[in-house]
C-alpha cells in the first residue's frame, strides 16, 4: 500500500507540471508564484506559508534563471547538488521530474522543494494532525537547510520562523505576520547563534565566532608573515546560514574571514584575521587581504539593506584602523577588482558611494533609542525584572499573556514623515514568549509583527522597515494579546530614519 501511495504522489507531481493546460486562471496569470506555492503545498500537504518562507530565506523568491548558488543550490527552493548534499536528485526521485526541469523551471522547483520537505517530515514521524501545525515542522525545516551542525540548523530554521512572525511580500507573493510557536525539539538544546553574546569573535567585538573547516583556509601569522593592506567585498550567492555551513564543509575549498546577514547586519567571523582565507581566487590577494561576504545575490538589490551596509562599514573601518589601511577604493575593493577574477561580485546593485561614506564615518542619520524608562508607558500589570544579563539598561518589563492588548508603549519624536527601520532589544529565555506581538504605529495604521523571545536576545533585532509620520507620539508597542506561551517582554526599541 505504501508503495502504491508513493507512486500516486509521484504521478500527481509530474502531472501538475507536465500536463498541458488549455486555459489558465486569471490568478495564475497575475500571480504565478502564489499559484505555484499553493499547488505544491496542496500536492504534498505542507503549510503554504512555511514553504514560501523557506524560499524567501534562501533566495528572496528568485530562481536566478537556473544558475547555482555558491554551494550548488538551484531555484527558488535552493535544491542542492554538491559532493555532500543531493536534495536536487532527491526531488527528482520524489516527483518523477527531470533534474534539468527542477533546476530551471520555477513551478517544478517549488514542487520539488515541497516534496523534499514532506519526505523529511515523514522521516520525523509527523502525522496528519501534526502537519497542520506550522510549529511542528521546525525539525523538518532545520534538516532542509542541510547545515553542518545542530547550531547552524537552528540558525537556519530560526530565520525561516522569524519570517513567519514578521511577514514578507515579494514578487506578487505575500505572507502575513502571524503567531506561531516553533517546536524546536532536539534543537532547543543547540547553541543559539543569534544571541550576540554567544561565541564571541576573537578579532572583532561585534561578531560571533563560528570557525570554518581547517581545510578551507591556510593557517598563518599575519601581519608578520604577510602584510594586510586590502579589504575585499564579496556577495555570498546564497543565504547567511547556508554560507556559514558551506565554509564548514571540507569539500568547499573556500572561506572568508567574515559573513554578514542582510536583514539586520549580524556578523559572523569564520577565519582568524591572522590566517589566510581562500576568498579572492588569487593567492597574492588572499595573503594581503581580509574577505567579507555579504548575504545575497549579485543580481538582486533587495538583499543590500542599510543595516548590512552599516554593519559591514563598521567592520571595515575597524579593520582599516587596526592595520593602517587607507579608507579608499584602492584598498577597499570588490571581488571583481581582483586581478584574474572570474567573479562579478559585489555587482552593479552594490552602492559603493553609500558604503564608503559609512566607512569613512559620514552618512550620519537620525536615530532614537528608547529604553523601558522615560518615554515609556505600561500598566501596573507589567512587572520589572533584572533577571537576565542580556537586558538593555538597568532592567526590563514583563507580563503574562492575556486575551487583551494592554500594550507597553515606546514613545519617540520623529523629525519627519518617511521610512524608518525599527529594531527591538529583549533578553531571551526559554520561559519568555514564543510569539510576542510588537505593534508599529505606521502612517497607514497599526501593524503587528510577532517575535520569538525565547532566542536571539541581547542584541538589536530588526522587525522591519515602516512608513512613520512625523511627531512626538507612541510609535512601538508590545502587546500581551498572544496565544504564544511565556512572559511577554518589553525592554528597548531603536528607530532609525532611512
Image (cartoon, grey):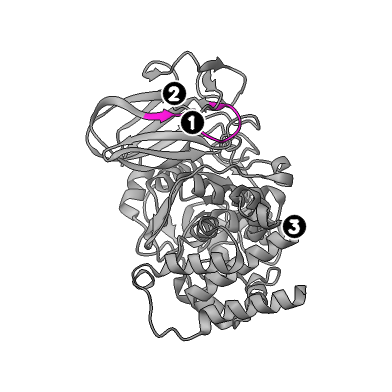
Q: Which residue is mark 1?
A: 481
Relative to 339, is 246 above or below? Answer: above
Indicate the position of residue 109 as horizontal and vertical percent values: 54, 72
Which residue is rendered at x = 45% and y = 60% of the image? Answer: 60
| Left or right for 311, reference 155 | left
Crowding near pointer 3: few (<14 within 10 Å), some, many (20+)? few
- Label 2: which secondary element: loop
Q: Which residue is mark 2?
A: 406
| Left or right for 482, reference 185 | left
Magenta span main SS = loop
Q: Which residues are magenta?
A: 476-488
Q: Can residue 281 be seen by looking at this rendering? A: no
Relative to 58, is 357 above or below? Answer: above
Dot 2 or dot 1, earlier in sequence: 2
| Left or right for 341, reference 144 | left
| Left or right for 359, reference 443 | right
Q: Residue furthest top?
A: 380
- Label 1: which secondary element: loop
- Label 3: which secondary element: loop
User: Which mark, by number, is residue 342?
Assistant: none
Residue in the foreground of this view, choosing between 148 and 123? 123
Q: Which residue is mark 3?
A: 125
Dividing the picture into quadrants, the one containing residue 378 is top left
Residue in the foreground of this view, choosing between 477 and 403? 403
Q: What is the quadrant of the C terminus in the image?
A: top left
Dividing the picture into quadrants, the one containing residue 400 is top right
- Using the numbered discs, state the Cα–Cα distance from disc 3 to disc 2 in whole angstroms: 40 Å
Dividing the picture into quadrants, the one containing residue 169 is bottom left
Residue in the foreground of this view, choosing between 210 and 411? 411
Indicate the position of residue 134 as horizontal and vertical percent values: 59, 51
Q: Are marks 2 and 1 in contact (CB under 8 Å)?
A: yes
Amino acid at each position: 500500500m505504501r508503495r502504491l501511495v508513493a507512486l500516486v504522489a509521484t504521478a500527481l507531481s509530474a502531472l501538475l507540471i507536465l500536463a498541458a493546460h488549455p486555459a489558465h486562471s486569471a490568478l495564475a496569470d497575475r500571480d504565478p508564484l502564489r499559484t505555484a506555492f499553493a499547488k505544491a503545498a496542496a500536492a504534498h500537504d505542507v503549510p503554504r506559508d512555511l514553504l514560501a518562507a523557506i524560499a524567501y530565506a534562501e533566495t528572496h523568491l528568485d530562481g536566478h534563471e537556473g544558475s547555482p548558488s555558491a554551494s550548488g543550490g538551484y531555484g527558488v527552493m535552493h535544491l542542492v547538488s554538491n559532493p555532500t548534499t543531493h536534495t536536487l536528485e532527491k526531488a527528482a526521485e520524489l516527483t518523477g521530474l527531470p533534474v534539468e526541469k527542477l533546476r530551471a523551471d520555477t513551478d517544478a522547483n517549488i514542487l520539488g522543494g515541497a516534496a523534499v520537505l514532506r519526505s523529511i517530515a515523514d522521516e520525523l514521524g509527523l502525522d496528519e494532525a501534526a502537519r497542520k501545525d506550522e510549529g511542528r515542522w521546525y525539525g523538518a525545516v532545520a534538516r532542509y537547510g542541510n547545515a553542518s551542525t545542530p547550531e547552524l540548523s537552528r540558525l537556519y530554521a530560526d530565520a525561516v520562523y522569524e519570517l513567519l512572525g514578521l511577514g514578507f511580500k515579494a514578487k506578487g507573493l505575500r505572507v502575513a505576520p502571524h503567531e506561531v510557536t516553533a517546536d524546536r525539539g532536539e534543537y532547543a538544546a543547540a547553541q543559539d547563534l543569534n544571541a550576540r553574546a554567544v561565541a564571541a569573535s576573537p578579532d572583532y567585538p561585534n561578531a560571533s565566532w563560528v570557525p570554518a573547516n581547517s581545510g578551507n583556509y591556510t593557517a598563518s601569522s599575519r601581519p608578520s608573515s604577510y602584510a594586510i593592506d586590502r579589504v575585499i567585498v564579496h556577495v555570498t550567492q546564497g543565504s547567511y546560514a547556508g554560507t556559514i555551513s558551506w565554509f564548514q564543509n571540507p569539500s568547499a575549498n573556500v572561506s572568508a574571514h567574515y559573513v554578514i546577514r542582510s536583514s539586520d547586519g549580524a556578523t559572523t567571523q569564520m577565519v582568524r584575521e591572522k590566517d589566510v582565507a581562500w576568498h579572492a581566487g588569487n593567492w597574492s590577494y588572499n595573503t594581503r587581504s581580509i574577505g567579507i561576504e555579504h548575504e545575497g545575490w549579485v543580481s538582486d538589490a533587495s538583499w543590500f539593506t542599510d543595516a548590512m551596509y552599516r554593519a559591514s562599514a563598521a567592520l571595515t573601518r575597524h579593520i582599516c584602523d587596526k592595520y593602517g589601511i587607507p579608507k579608499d577604493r584602492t584598498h577597499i575593493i570588490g571581488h571583481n577588482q581582483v586581478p584574474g577574477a572570474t567573479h562579478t561580485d559585489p555587482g552593479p546593485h552594490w552602492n559603493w558611494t553609500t558604503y564608503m561614506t559609512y566607512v569613512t564615518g559620514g552618512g550620519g542619520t537620525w536615530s532614537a533609542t528608547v529604553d523601558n524608562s522615560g518615554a515609556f508607558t505600561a500598566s501596573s500589570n507589567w512587572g520589572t525584572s533584572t533577571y537576565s544579563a542580556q537586558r538593555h539598561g538597568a532592567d526590563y518589563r514583563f507580563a503574562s499573556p492575556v486575551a487583551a492588548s494592554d500594550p507597553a508603549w515606546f514613545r519617540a519624536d520623529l523629525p519627519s514623515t518617511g521610512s524608518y527601520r525599527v529594531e527591538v532589544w529583549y533578553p531571551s529565555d526559554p520561559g519568555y514568549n514564543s510569539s510576542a506581538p510588537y505593534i508599529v504605529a505606521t502612517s497607514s495604521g497599526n501593524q503587528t509583527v510577532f517575535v520569538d523571545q525565547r532566542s536571539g536576545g541581547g542584541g538589536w533585532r530588526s522587525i522591519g522597515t515602516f512608513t512613520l509620520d512625523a511627531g512626538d507620539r507612541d510609535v512601538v508597542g508590545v502587546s500581551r494579546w498572544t496565544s504564544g506561551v511565556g512572559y511577554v517582554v518589553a525592554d528597548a526599541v531603536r528607530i532609525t530614519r532611512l
